[in-house]
Image (cartoon, grey):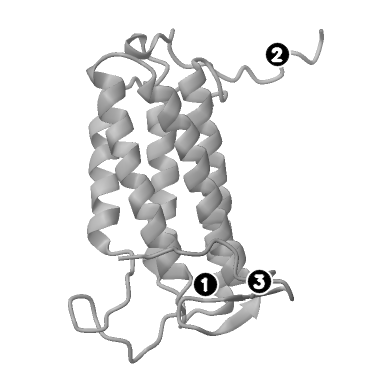
Amino acid sequence: MVRLSKIYTKTGDNGQTMLGDGSMTPKESLRVEAYGEVDEANATLGIAIARIRSMSGDEPGAMAELLTSVQHDLFDCGADLCVPRRADEPSEGEKGAKLRIVQHQVDRLEQRIDSYNERLKPLNSFVLPGGTQASADLHLARTVTRRAERAVAALLHAEPNAVNSLAMVYLNRLSDLLFVLARIANLPEFGGDGDVLWVPGSSRDR
């Protein structure tokens, strides 16, 4: 259980911050950037969830519930990234094991992607971010998640033995899920009229 009794500690006033293992690192480090981007992705998901929860019906309710579970996963991901991985650390289920993203969390996203995608028509063009407000919010969350994925990729490249690669895989799948959900949010059940498609070169001669 996490206990937060004091909001400001002043320990970061010199440009350093404490990682989950107690070590100090510059706030501009790749690791801090990575879990900071994950935090931002989580915040944008919160906006999308608030929008979707304001809608009536079983479909929005189920989507909001799924995305809320994803928010918990993203906190797991942030906790994973803020503790450098060690070769000798206990494995999952062992005493003293660190909280890490696991394959089951990735598999769950893939199952949801497949389930939702079965309801969608194949695309013959790229999708513009927009349509319903919920769809636009989900596209924003998708792009921020992609940015978080790139930040984790940079960290993984710099510290390959100190990063759980499943954290990056999870973010990759999450961005795919958000793309599919953004399309779902443009269906009539969400008040939409379908995908808003890119028309290449459509405004060049206007």
The residue under label 1 is 156
Rendering coords of residue 17 (x, y %): 61, 74
Q: For the residues carrying marks 1 and 2, which lies nearer the camera in this image? A: 1
Element type at marker 1?
helix
Look at label 1 and name its amino acid.
Answer: Leu
* Residue reaching furthest to the front: 5
For the residues marked 2 and 3, what is the alpha-carbon distance in whole angstroms?
A: 53 Å
Whether residue 174 is visible: yes
For the residues marked 3 and 1, what is the alpha-carbon distance in whole angstroms?
A: 29 Å
> Which residue lies at the image location 47% right of the left edge and 46% below the top edge?
42
Rendering coords of residue 194 (x, y %): 43, 12
* Residue reaching furthest to the bottom: 88
- Residue 64 vs 75, above or below: the answer is above
Element type at marker 3?
loop
Residue 3: quarter of image: bottom left
Look at label 3 and name its amino acid.
Answer: Lys
The residue under label 2 is 202
Residue nearest the observer in this picture, 24 or 182 = 24
Residue nearest the observer in this picture, 10 or 167 = 10
The residue under label 3 is 10
Look at label 2 and name its amino acid.
Answer: Ser
Q: Residues within 10 Å of mark 3 (few under 14, many from 20)?
A: few
Q: Is residue 13 left or right of residue 80?
A: right
Rendering coords of residue 92 (x, y %): 22, 76
Q: For the residues carrying marks 3 and 1, which lies nearer the camera in this image? A: 3
- Residue 176 vs 85, above or below: the answer is above
Mark 3 vs 1, N-terminal side = 3
